Image (cartoon, rainbow, N blue to C red):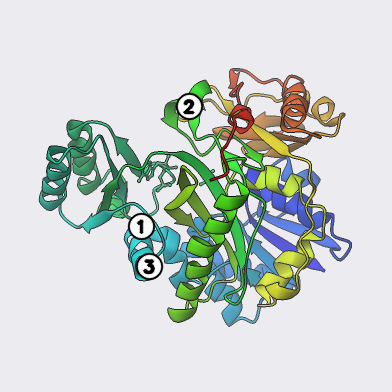
Amino acid sequence: MQVLVIGSGGREHALVWALKKSPQVDHVYCAPGNAGIAADAECVDISVGELEKLADFAEQKKIDLTVVGPENPLCAGIADVFRSRGLAVFGPSKEAAQLEGSKDFAKQFMLKYGIPTARGAAFTDAANAKEYVKKEFADGANGIVVKADGLAAGKGVLVAESLQDALDFIDGCFEGSFGTAGAKVVIEEKLDGEEASILALTDGKTIVPLVSSQDHKRIFDLDKGPNTGGMGAYSPAPVVTPKAAVRIQQEILLPFLRGIQQEKLDFRGVIFVGLMIDHGKPKVLEFNVRFGDPEIQPVLRRFDGDWFDVVNHVAHGDLANAKLVWSGEPAVSVVIAAGGYPGKYAKGDEITGLAEAEADGAKVFHAGSALRDGKIVTAGGRVLGVSARGKTIPEAIANAYRAVEKIHFNNMQFRKDIGQKALREHEDI
Ligand code: AMP
Ligand code: GLY
């Protein structure tokens, strides 16, 4: 089988790595890929936005399955372009991708199908949005969440503790801080609890959750500092207790499946549900229509089956016959970022110690790396995801950090507390 993965981050490296292990897979291409992916796949110099060119390539190379990593090409309709040419693809249609591409679309969908979420409202002008926020604070809210409606690369959400911050953010949205993504905003109540991510495969007929995981969104230890794309993740997430998992299936995933069926959305891919769990009760913060990054890294480290077989079944609408095989061993992935990220950061610094880091069974997924004069150099904010398994969560943490210590580049930064949250006790209520 010939497989094409679209994207260039740590998520795509993890997907390539898992697909390559399948005995059915002869060759993996990745467009555009990065320096680390190039060791596991043949990189193709086509960017994720060139939908027709990607489909031309898939036709020429007789690609049997294309797996789309990021949300932008999905929201631009890549799955429709491929399917209209008879090419098998893992990823939802453009219409279904609005579940991530528009927070308002997602909110309406959740309300219609009874999926628990934060109370909220959508606005297309600043004055009404501000009035709503003022009223919420006057009524005693201890915070409010303002979200730009469209795709904003993870930057379009403010959890505001003060009225002024919320008002300023609303102004920013309507003044174009996020381009057209901010022409509409969704404002919702601030939820308390602990966050977790559930990634579930669906082909529109069946929905199957992958093992649970949890990201660390803030840049600094103890969840301090600004939000990032994600600084590390572990799986499983103990906050998803057995009882919470049942509630997630009953109250969120099954209504979700009913919703996509009734709305006739062509969804053959993964739904990534961002959850807030408060005393065992899950509520949806957001939907994404792609694998979480870095969440998918520890999740795939725990997958012991044939990943190609699974995603191929999804793409062909036959998920019911796919076999998911999980290891009981936990896994942890620690992101190493460039100094300054998520603000300004340097590129082009040489990375050393990669082979040493992998000597002990860890796997280094590359997110922002490039090859220059035969050397691997930094090329993005999040540079690497260092992942390892262990018999227990503390052992997986220790294994990942032992590998991290072997790696060096100028001004590298990483959190020292990835996985610590998983050591807390969680009541199964
Ligand atoms: P989103 O892109 O909607 O997931 O929002 C990004 C982050 O903002 C989430 O991961 C949460 O940390 C936070 N967030 C979003 N919505 C809420 C909410 N209603 N209450 C509290 N925090 C939220
Ligand atoms: N780690 C969060 C995301 O992929 O959106």
Residue 297 x, y percent position in the rendering: 68, 44
How far across and how far down the image is residue 262, in percent? 45, 80
Left/right of residue 325 with respect to residue 272 in the rendered view? right
Of residue 27 and residue 162, the one placed in the foreground of this image is 162
**Residue 172 versus residue 119 in the image, above or below:** above
In this rendering, would 27 be left or right of 68?
A: right
Amino acid type at circle 2 is Asp
Residue 227 vs 69, above or below: the answer is above
Q: Which of marks 1 and 2 is nearer the N terminus?
A: 1
Image-quadrant location for residue 322: bottom right
Of badges 3 and 1, nearer the viewer stands 3
Amino acid type shown at disc 1: Lys
**Picture coordinates of residue 272 (x, y %)?**
54, 55
Q: In which quadrant will I find the N terminus?
A: bottom right
Residue 223: numbered disc: 2
Neighbor class of circle 3 (other Cα within 10 Å; few <14, some 14-19, many 20+) is some
Does residue 59 appear in the picture of this structure? no
The type of residue carrying mark 3 is Phe
Q: From the viewer's side, name the closer residue of 145 and 100.
A: 145
The image quarter in which residue 367 lies: top right
What whole-number distance in Å separates the C-alpha atoms at marks 3 and 2? 31 Å
Instruction: Give the label on residue 213, or none.
Output: none
- The CA span between labels 3 and 1 is 10 Å
Badge 1 is on which residue? 103
- N-term mark: 3 or 2: 3
Q: Nearer the viewer, residue 38 or 227?
A: 227
Q: Which residue is identified by label 3? A: 109
State which image quarter holds ligand 1: top left
Determine if the C-beta at disc 1 is less than 8 A from ligand 1.
Answer: yes
- Which residue is painted at 38% across and 64% down in the image? 110
Instruction: Please identify, in this view, whether the residue under mark 1 or under mark 2 is nearer the observer.
Output: 2
What secondary structure is marked by label 3? helix
